[in-house]
Image (cartoon, grey):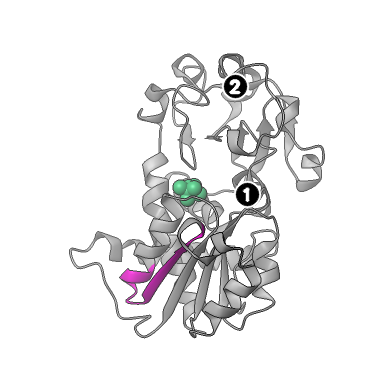
Amino acid sequence: MHFNRKDLLGINELDVSEIEYLLDLSRSFKEINERSIKKVPTLRGKTIIHLFYEPSTRTRTSFDIAAKRLSADTYSITASTSSIVKGETVLDTLKNLEAMKPDVFVIRHSASGAPWMLAGRTTASVINAGDGMHEHPSQALLDMLTILDNKKSLRGLNVLIVGDIYHSRVARSNIWGLTKMGANVVVCGPATLIPPNIDSMGAQVSHRLDQCIPEADVIMVLRLQKERQQQMLLPSLREYSAWYGMNGERLKRAKKDVLIMHPGPINRGVEISPEVADGPCSVILDQVTNGVAVRMALLFVLGQR
Ligand code: CP
């Protein structure tokens, strides 16, 4: 199976064989990241531009490390230090950068759909590094890879996604990806943070975290996205934490081999307690490590077109 797309925009548009191909390829790149010399010449002479309109630590750094480990040349554009602050539109920015002949754009934007619009206006490949409240495909791939490092299969696995589902592109990409791969996905959070159409995406809905925990093989805790909340959707952070925070007491009621995941950044003491985030069930830093391998795989397939 080959990946014949020009762009990687969302998990929703991928079929199972494409997801399996990208996960297999990511596994093969993990070995390079364990070497003392972590570099291969695969993308020598290729140019990759990271165009980030929103802050990022993990995604941006791991795409940059991934590109450099494949020997590509990389350039980073941050909204706050570019001509974007002078009022240049995203399309003008793209067209001007395209004039410098890059091979791949890695784009994060606050507007849902922006990478699709831009992909249709450039001959370079576009990778969606997170668009608004819509998709974060490389995050879902690294999450699936991390689960498969610890569990035999995604098929039949009970995955509980807890927290701010409404604002989460990570939740949407994971629901689409995990259900395609045969997992049972339950989303849990206060009604104000669950989008009304979520069951049409294949996820079950619960508002009672304590009832969901004993059944879960994987508990994916999401960050409370204070920056995307336009109105008061919660009575208080203390109350949110009491009802939906993943803490040591709740973990005692989980399966012994449960995996605790979080895409980061973490609000410690809000959606997850430090003892859970740093405890033996946590694979949060493994997710970050796998992010490099997944992004190497994506740049490999798209950068060689
Ligand atoms: N998980 C994730 O997207 O983290 P960053 O916002 O730091 O890239």
SS class, disc 1? helix
Is 71 in the magenta? Answer: yes
Whether residue 1 is visible here, answered yes or no, is no
Q: Is residue 122 left or right of residue 63?
A: right
Residue occupied by mark 2:
244
Circles 1 and 2, Cβ within 8 Å, touching? The answer is no
Query: Residue 125, position in %: x, y?
Result: 56, 77
At x 81%, y 45%, the residue is: 200
Residue drawn 51% across and 23% down?
270
Left or right: residue 33 compared with residue 300: left
Give the magenta part as a residue range: 67-79
Residue 236: x and y in percent read 62, 17
Image vertical order of residue 201 relative to residue 261, above or below: below
What is the crowding at mark 1: few (fewer than 14 residues within 10 Å), some, or many (at least 20)?
Answer: many
Label 1 or label 2, whichever lies nearer to me, is: 2
Q: CA distance from mark 1 to mark 2?
A: 22 Å
Q: Amino acid at mark 2?
A: Tyr
| Residue named by callout 1 | 178
Does residue 211 show up magenta in the picture?
Answer: no
Q: Nearer the viewer, residue 241 or 177?
A: 241
- Pointer 1 or 2: first along the chain: 1
> Within 10 angstroms of label 2, few (less than 14), some, or many (20 or more) residues?
many
Q: Is mark 1 within 8 Å of ligand 1?
A: no
Residue type at mark 1? Leu
